Image (tube, rainbow, N blue to C red):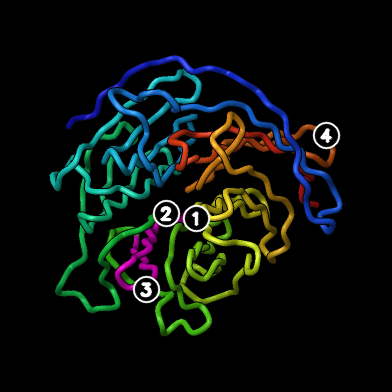
Amino acid sequence: MTSTSHKFKIAFCPWLFVFCFTAAAQAQVEVIFQRSILDEKIGARHLSNALGMSADLNDNLYIADTGNNRIIKYHLAGNTFRETGGFGFGNEEFDRPVEVWAGNGLDVWIADYNNRRVKRYDKDLNFIAAFSADPASETALQFGYPAAVTLSLQGELFLADHDFNRVLRFDIFGAPIASFGDFSSGEGQLERPAKLLATRNGEIWVSDSLRHALMRYDAYGNFLGQIGGGVLHQPAGLAEWQDKIFAADRGRHRIFVFDKEGELLAEFGQAGNGADEIFAPADVIILGAQKIAKLHVKISLAVLDTGNNRVQLFTLAMPMSE
């Protein structure tokens, strides 16, 4: 199936709701629901168990529509979309795509889970390349079922693997050079890596759905610590803004906001299928931020509302970092 583009209308329905936050945050955070998008048919089908979402620098969302074995590119301002995929193992086909990354505005990387490969497209969803593990390489550099992908600012690819429950690091030429998070990582051993985040300062964060925590590593795979224990249940998608980490929790049907040392700053979300509710959110991304007062900022974010087969748009008014 080649990529095709379309246009359709969406409805706007703002709601306001505010949640309680930790006393240590010393400030109230206001959460405003903006609207739902992609809750109608996209082409011939509704979203079906979409598990991955990313955004480029030009107001485009990219969604791994897992149940429909396709990738969708949706322009927030123009309400237009393009799609590619279909079930299969060909170059432009997928078997359970679970993750998409498009953060640099040039490349679109996709974790094609059951085909046990990673695929690269351009920003317009034209196929470029695909690669799987090299069976001749050493075991430490192989992968089986790719669960997540991300690129660092240096252009290195990181891949979360469900066969070995670890992370692989690839150089800018696409060659695997290291792995971390397996039994040799000690306290940093992963049990079920869900999503990856490459931060601006070069760290790699991993949400671990079985450890119920966010695991923190440097770019070389050295374990730096973990946060979220006792709070998170089934953490999935991650996003960063300044010194804050946003985490979607599929088990608690909420979005949590931490500082990087692990202090819980905010949480929001209500389980359900109502206009301003979410259910089993698989991903969260920051769309932008705007200063609204001397020490406050308004953050726009999108939540992949997987259980309701749609995307929810919110804004958060919260204190800026000092």
- Circle 1 Cα neighbour tier, 10 Å, few/some/many (<14 / 14–19 / ≥20): many
Q: Position of residue 9 (x, y in %)?
A: 45, 14
Choose top left, top right, bottom left or bottom right for residue 44.
Answer: top left
Q: Label 2: which residue? A: 151
For marks 2 and 4 on the same chain, the one whose residue lies earlier in the sequence: 2
Task: Specify the quadrant that holds the N terminus.
Answer: top left
The local secondary structure at tag 1 comes to strand
Of labels 1 and 4, the one closer to you = 1
* Residue 288, placed above or below residue 142: above
The amino acid pointed to by label 4 is Ala
Question: Magenta span covers which residues?
Answer: 150-171
Q: Label 4: which residue? A: 293
Choose top left, top right, bottom left or bottom right for residue 92.
Answer: top left
Q: Label 1: which residue? A: 236
The amino acid pointed to by label 3 is Ser
Q: Position of residue 84 (x, y in %)?
A: 25, 33
The tag on residue 179 is: 3
For marks 3 and 4 on the same chain, the one whose residue lies earlier in the sequence: 3
Q: Residue at x 29, y 30 (%)?
A: 83
Q: Residue at x 65, y 31 (%)?
A: 33
